[in-house]
Image (cartoon, rainbow, N blue to C red):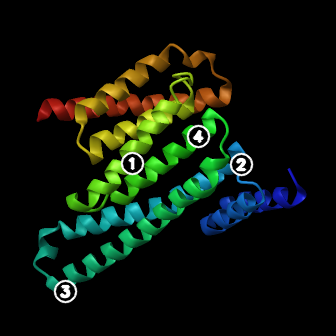
Amino acid sequence: MSSDRELKFFMARVADQAERHEDVIQYIKEIIDIDPKLSLDERNLLSVAYKALTGNRRTALRSVNAFLEDPSIQGAKERENRLIELRNSLIKELDDYCNSIVKFVDDKLLPAADDAISKVFYWKLKADYFRYSVEFKDEAARAQGSEAAKKAYEEAMNLAKDLSKANPQYLGLALNYSVFLYEIIGQKNEAIELADKSFKEAVGLIDKLEEDEYSEATLILQLLKDNVQLWTDDQNAE
């Protein structure tokens, strides 16, 4: 790693600790200009920064939508209009971040990826941000983005087929794809089947992982298990 790259990576880590997420992205962009083949740590910093920025908007949108669903607000036109303006502004900000990371992946990162783990990481990243971009849109606006997300998840799953079923990268992909199937496009049975299958396939293999991967995989397995239980209960209640 060149001294210039090392310095930029160091500053990206500092910015991450200081929760200066825009700065993290800028430093990683500068690293990409040096060499678009990112290390695992560099990829993770980029991912965490975008997740924080989009996560803030997604949380804010849930709060605004809760206010809009409040019967007392629905009768107050001025408040309702202001909330709609705020929601539209937040959706645009979310869209901008999602489009930004997808463009990065397409233009710079995927073309430089030369191993399965990197390719799975980037295709999953694309899929996740397509999902986030349609999460708060109406049904008509969801269609195109949902199709793009589905194709990206399917490509990531295909590229991940030779990874260990206990690999955290594979498990994280299976988790997010199942959430997409359940929450965004309503393929609930398929979501439960994928989450349940992924959990069961990994359980017998997890003890073979290194300590850091073991901890990450264990956390994802618990999320898969919880989702299967929750979704199954919801299906039975319908």
Q: Is residue 53 visible?
A: yes
108 or 63: nearer the eye? 108
User: Where does the image place residue 54, in percent across and percent down from the top left?
Assistant: 47, 61
- Pointer 4 local density, CA inside 10 Å: few below 14, some 14–19, many at least 20: many
- Give the label on residue 119, or none: 4
The answer to which quarter of the image holds residue 179 is top left
User: Where does the image place residue 142, in percent across and percent down from the top left?
Assistant: 28, 57
* Mark 4 element type: helix
Residue on which disc 2 sits: 37
| In the image: residue 102, left or right of residue 85 | right
Residue extending farthest bottom: 78
90 or 137: nearer the eye? 137
Residue at the spot 78% in from the left edge and 61% down from the top edge: 8
Q: CA distance from mark 4 to mark 1?
A: 15 Å
- Pointer 2 local density, CA inside 10 Å: few below 14, some 14–19, many at least 20: some
What's under tag 4, amino acid-wise?
A: Lys
The answer to which quarter of the image holds residue 225 is top left
Residue at the spot 69% in from the left edge and 43% down from the top edge: 40
Quarter holding the C terminus is top left
Dot 3 or dot 1, earlier in sequence: 3
Residue at the spot 51% in from the left edge and 44% down from the top edge: 123
* Mark 2 element type: loop
Residue on which disc 1 sits: 149
Q: CA distance from mark 2 to mark 4?
A: 11 Å
- Give the label on residue 231, or none: none
Dot 2 or dot 4, earlier in sequence: 2
Residue on which disc 3 sits: 78
User: Where does the image place residue 73, in percent across and percent down from the top left?
Assistant: 16, 75
